């Protein structure tokens, strides 16, 4: 289409709009945070192959009629809102080729997803597990190792260990 600039807010005048394809343009900036108000009845939203930046607005989860969401090939960052897994009509979710990070939503198996080429995503299938916080036992091992090593390989005296280290 050859559109340039930010998301066209005049779309709000199309109050019964159910499908919007703005793919393969030069649209940039953030996807509007009030997109669910602008597109109340949208079932298909394709914003792929643009230059959108910033985070995916959580408000998209309020587009309850949404069947297809394609945000492929933009410059979107941050995490995918977990609320998207609550979109009961969603059948296709595509966010490949962005800069997204963090855990992906737990979509039902009926939803076709594409997360390709987002190096920071984790949590489902080939994405691999998300790195959680270090477990208590691994922290204990580090503390114990530091206490045993001490200064010049000697074990520190009890008063040197302070309140942070507890003796078992």
Image (tube, helix red, strand yellow):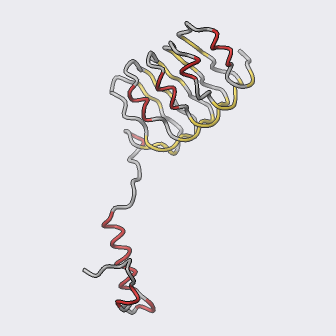
Whether residue 41 sits left or right of residue 14 in the image: it is left
Residue 98: x, y in percent? Answer: 58, 36
Q: Nearer the viewer, residue 152 or 87?
A: 87
Query: Please, is residue 152 above or below residue 12 in the view?
Result: below
Residue 155: x, y in percent? Answer: 36, 90
The residue sitting at 60% across, 24% down in the picture is 48
- The answer to which image quadrant residue 103 occupies is top left
Q: In which quadrant is the C terminus drawn?
A: bottom left
Residue 6: x, y in percent? Answer: 71, 25
Q: Nearer the viewer, residue 153 or 164?
A: 164
Number of marks: 0
Whether residue 54 sits left or right of residue 159 in the image: it is right
* Residue located farthest toward the top when viewing the structure as drawn: 16
Residue 58: x, y in percent? Answer: 51, 31
Query: Please, is residue 124 above or below residue 168 in the view?
Result: above
- The answer to which image quadrant residue 126 occupies is top left
The residue sitting at 47% across, 26% down in the picture is 61
Q: Nearer the viewer, residue 105 or 122?
A: 105
Query: Please, is residue 91 above or below residue 54 in the view?
Result: above
Q: In which quadrant is the N terminus drawn?
A: top right
* Residue located farthest toward the left when viewing the structure as drawn: 168
The residue sitting at 74% across, 25% down in the picture is 5
């Amino acid at each position: 289409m050859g559109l340039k600039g930010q998301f066209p807010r005049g779309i709000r005048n199309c109050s019964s709009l159910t499908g919007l394809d703005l793919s393969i343009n030069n649209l940039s900036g953030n996807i509007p945070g009030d997109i669910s108000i602008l597109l109340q009845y949208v079932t298909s939203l394709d914003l792929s192959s643009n230059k959108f930046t910033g985070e995916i607005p959580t408000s998209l989860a309020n587009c309850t009629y949404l069947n297809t969401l394609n945000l492929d090939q933009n410059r979107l960052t941050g995490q995918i809102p977990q609320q998207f897994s609550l979109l009961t009509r969603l059948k296709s979710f595509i966010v490949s080729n962005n800069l997204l990070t963090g855990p992906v939503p737990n979509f039902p198996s009926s939803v076709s997803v594409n997360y390709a080429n987002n190096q920071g995503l984790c949590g489902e299938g080939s994405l691999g597990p998300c790195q959680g916080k270090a477990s208590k036992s691994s922290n204990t091992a580090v503390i114990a190792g530091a206490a045993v090593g001490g200064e010049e390989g000697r074990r520190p005296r009890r008063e040197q260990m302070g309140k942070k280290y507890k003796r078992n």
